Amino acid sequence: MKIEAWLFGGIGYFFAVVGVVYGFLVKWEEPVGFLALILVGGLAFMIGSYLRFTAKRVGMRPEDRTDAEIHEGSGEQGHFSPWSWWPLVLALACAAGFLGLAVGFWILYIGAGLAVIGLVGWVYEYSRGDHAH
């Protein structure tokens, strides 16, 4: 993960410098452009720092070594729940939120409530065991 951390760190520096240069070119009168570029740089720094901390915690992966074999990367890659319905609930909550921004602000509150329910359900899905609803 060190390569990914360096990549996002470099992207962060690039966007921070470009944001400052853009701010000087527009004489800091156009507030959205340079602020957006600086915020994108900050986001890249956050992702890069997360990847750097994770690389220190996890150690070298086969992708990070030059002498690694293909079979070293095989095996379980993570924990996924293919039977979970909570991502669908969160997607409906996001759709209701965007609909609320476009049509009526009161729909946004319904979407926010649905999002809280979906998030709590997804986080605590395995607290009672598999398939325990």
Image (cartoon, rainbow, N blue to C red):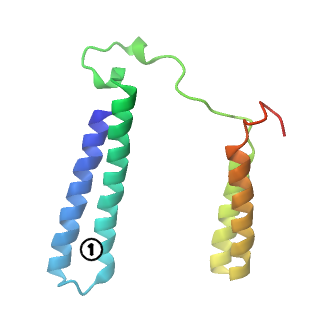
State the image coordinates of residue 19 (x, y, percent, origin top left): 23, 69
Quadrant location, the N terminus = top left
> Which of the 4 quarters of the picture holds residue 93?
bottom right
Q: Taking 107 as reference, is 26 left or right?
A: left
Q: Residue at x 54, y 21 (%)?
A: 76
State the image coordinates of residue 57 (x, y, percent, origin top left): 38, 30
Q: Is residue 133 above or below residue 129?
A: below
Quadrant location, the C terminus = top right
Q: Taking 69 as reference, is 124 left or right?
A: right
Label 1 packing within 10 angstroms: few (<14), some (14-19), many (20+): many
State the image coordinates of residue 43 (x, y, percent, origin top left): 36, 57
Q: Residue at x 19, y 82 (%)?
A: 26
> Which of the 4 quarters of the picture holds residue 64?
top left
State the image coordinates of residue 56 (x, y, percent, origin top left): 33, 31
Q: Residue at x 33, y 78 (%)?
A: 32
State the residue position of label 1: 34
Q: Is residue 100 above or below residue 121?
A: below
